[in-house]
Amino acid sequence: MGFFSAICPVTFDKPLFCSILGNTLLSTVPGISGAGPTPEKTLLTPILDAELITFGTIKSQPIKPNTPTGCPTPATITRAMMELTGLHPVFINSGLQNQPTVPCIDAYGNVGEDPRFRDAVPHARNLFRQGELIGNFLSAYSDLLVLGECVPGGTTTALCVLRALNYDAAVSSSFTNNPVTKKDEICRLALKRISDDEVSLPLDIIRYTGDPMMPVAAGIARTYAGNIILAGGTQMLAVSAVIKAIGGSLPNIVTTTYVRDDPTANVVHLAKQIGIGISYVDPGFGDIGHIGLARYCIGEVKEGMGAGGAMCLAYLLGYSPEAIRSKILTTVNTYS
């Protein structure tokens, strides 16, 4: 394939990039999430990523937006695309452990709990209704919504939700070595609670084992009047499975080839099971001229903060693959 696989044509006049921020305490389980220097600090990652995209720098911490191996975070890619297109992103606080430091639409949720021991999102239905209200609100200001997310640990909650909805799911990871065994064990314990209590309704499944981003995203998709693209990998596949289960119209998904090609995940198979259209962006980081970006090609990071969707949006706005790649390289070099 070239820079993009087949993308459904959309017409629009007022595009909007939006990302839902949230936390799940599963990210603090050692070895589950690579989205932070320590398990505890993963709870800060959505806030720091939003700072980077909004201000062009991380203001509240004296750190650079790179992994310990020098791999630029997906937020740097999203920042590059916002600069290239001149768009101003919108953030939604679905449930953060810490106070956000950038302006956000607040859904008034709480951090997601550990689904092995208690309900993960006790107020899932209320968050879904908040999402519906936000979808109506965003419809008044845009006709194309590219909706991303930042929830460290969210691939594990996605695994739980997908399997609870009876999908044969294997999910991706920001690690080069996906902690499949740990995720499967968490999922087994969460699904036992669901089975013991005979839970079957999709929003109740989120209540038991999801994260706060999921019901907000599903609510937005339910009411948004324009075209919507879900920007993300297995986490957005879980959202899509919920949308389908509640009888909603399925949007399209855009993610990176690095998620698609993860041998420990089954993204293509999952999309077929759900019946959703999914497209892939291949930014060619292997030969872009940055050793850190090249690490995406060996399975580090892969996707996040709507990076694949942000590149797709720039492409839909008429920017060439060369211009997109050049802007990404220029941007990440400023943080070296």
Image (cartoon, rainbow, N blue to C red):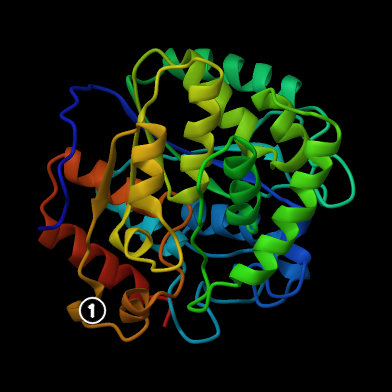
Look at label 1 and name its amino acid. Gly
Foreground residue among 148 and 330 = 148
Foreground residue among 172 and 9 = 172
Q: Position of residue 212 (x, y in %)?
A: 69, 38
In the image, is 328 to the left or to the right of 72? left
Please identify the quadrant where the C terminus is shown.
bottom left
Residue bearing the label numbered 1: 286
Q: Residue at x 39, y 38 (%)?
A: 273
Tell me if residue 80 can be seen: yes
Q: Position of residue 285 (x, y in %)?
A: 25, 73
In the image, is 139 to the left or to the right of 133? left
Q: Position of residue 267 (x, y in %)?
A: 39, 52
Category of crowding for the residue at label 1, using alpha-carbon neighbours closer than 10 angstroms: few (below 14), some (14–19), many (at least 20): some
Q: Is residue 113 above or below residue 109?
A: below
Q: Is residue 198 above or below residue 97?
A: above
Q: Secondary structure at mark 1?
A: helix
In the image, is 302 to the left or to the right of 189? left
